[in-house]
Amino acid sequence: MVHEHHFGQAEPRAGEPRTGLVVILTAATMAIEIVAGLVFGSMALLADGLHMASHASALGLAWIAYVYARRHAHDTGFSFGTGKVNTLAGFTSAVVLALFALMMAGESIHRFLAPVPIAFDRAIAVAVLGLVVNGASVLILRERHGHGHNDHHDDHHHDHNLRAAHLHVLADTLTSILAIVALLGAKLYGAVWMDPAMGVVGGGLVAIWAWGLARDTGAVLLDRQAPGEAAAALKDAIESGGRLRVVDLHLWSIGPGYRAAIISVRSPDPCNRRDIEALIPDALGIAHLTIEINPPEGTG
């Protein structure tokens, strides 16, 4: 019997339409802010627009990943399903973010050396518009929990693609606030240096986010072992009866809410695979399981 490897990826996820809506909102606001930043001479506003461009790209990739993973869920060419498509999109987003961070910092430094006139009122109005759109996007992408899990495995069941998109717009919101502060400071107190300074700060924030996203998604793409507490919980569950002993264990993520595991156990007497499967907690989200049963050391 051949068992399927789509692991629920064929079903539309709640984050897909919400991400699509935010892509449209972000792209429209991005275009307005970039044009306004160039026309009104505000580096902070331009940086915010470029920051939104990076997030529009990342959010677009997130939405495409949802669609691709769903439409190719039954493709047998994917050994463990299409769950990592979302992770690959996240890693690509991290690279895009890093490039935009460099652009923002470079342009801000240039503006320090060669300031340009700023049309403050119009620039502030556009920045406020960006803040409103970002705030709305945060609400749209906010994860909604309809259950009350409180164990340490709960975070594995989140839609990490949706969480990444949510963090993108949170970062956008913060950058919009920085742009408004910089423009107000320059207009009210003559602190024109605040405008490019906030561009540098914004670039730094994007770089930090890019690094965190690359680190987390890279770990999944490289099949990094699941957190220690998850592996320990799996080992303890199997050994709970005192008869079996785990001698080798590999546990890793293969998609949002799903893990694969390879387990090697020693048993003093004949043991059935189904007996071992029955010991494994559902909360661990193990969708693909390989079990090797060995006799006690010194026998067989």
Image: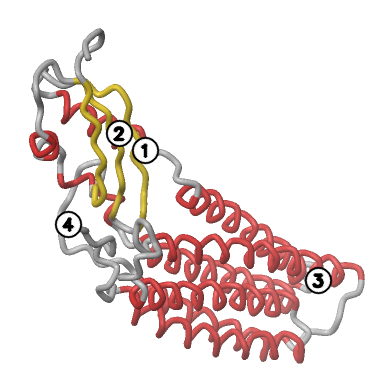
Q: Earlier in the sequence, mark 4 or mark 2?
A: 4
Question: Residue at coordinates 34% horizontally, 65% vertically from top-left?
Answer: 76
Residue under label 1, please give it: 227
Q: Secondary structure at mark 1?
A: loop
Residue under label 4, please give it: 1
Judge from the rendering whether residue 121 lies leftward or rightward of residue 262; answer left or right: right
Q: CA distance from mark 4 to mark 2?
A: 29 Å
Q: Hey, which quadrant is residue 293 in on the image?
A: top left
Judge from the rendering whether residue 261 lies leftward or rightward of residue 64; answer left or right: left
Question: Residue at coordinates 57% horizontally, 57% vertically from top-left?
Answer: 209
Q: Earlier in the sequence, mark 3 or mark 2?
A: 3
Q: Are marks 3 and 1 in contact (CB under 8 Å)?
A: no
Residue under label 2, please give it: 231
Badge 4 density bin: few <14, some 14–19, many ≥20, Cα 10 Å: few
- The amino acid beneath tag 4 is Met
Residue under label 3, please give it: 107
Q: Position of residue 35 (x, y in %)?
A: 70, 90
- The amino acid beneath tag 2 is Ala
Q: Position of residue 192 (x, y in %)?
A: 79, 72
Front tag of 3 and 2: 2
Q: Nearer the viewer, residue 206 or 243?
A: 243
Q: Secondary structure at mark 3?
A: helix
Judge from the rendering whether residue 103 lies leftward or rightward of residue 228; answer left or right: right
- The amino acid beneath tag 3 is Glu
Quick one: quadrant of the N terminus?
bottom left
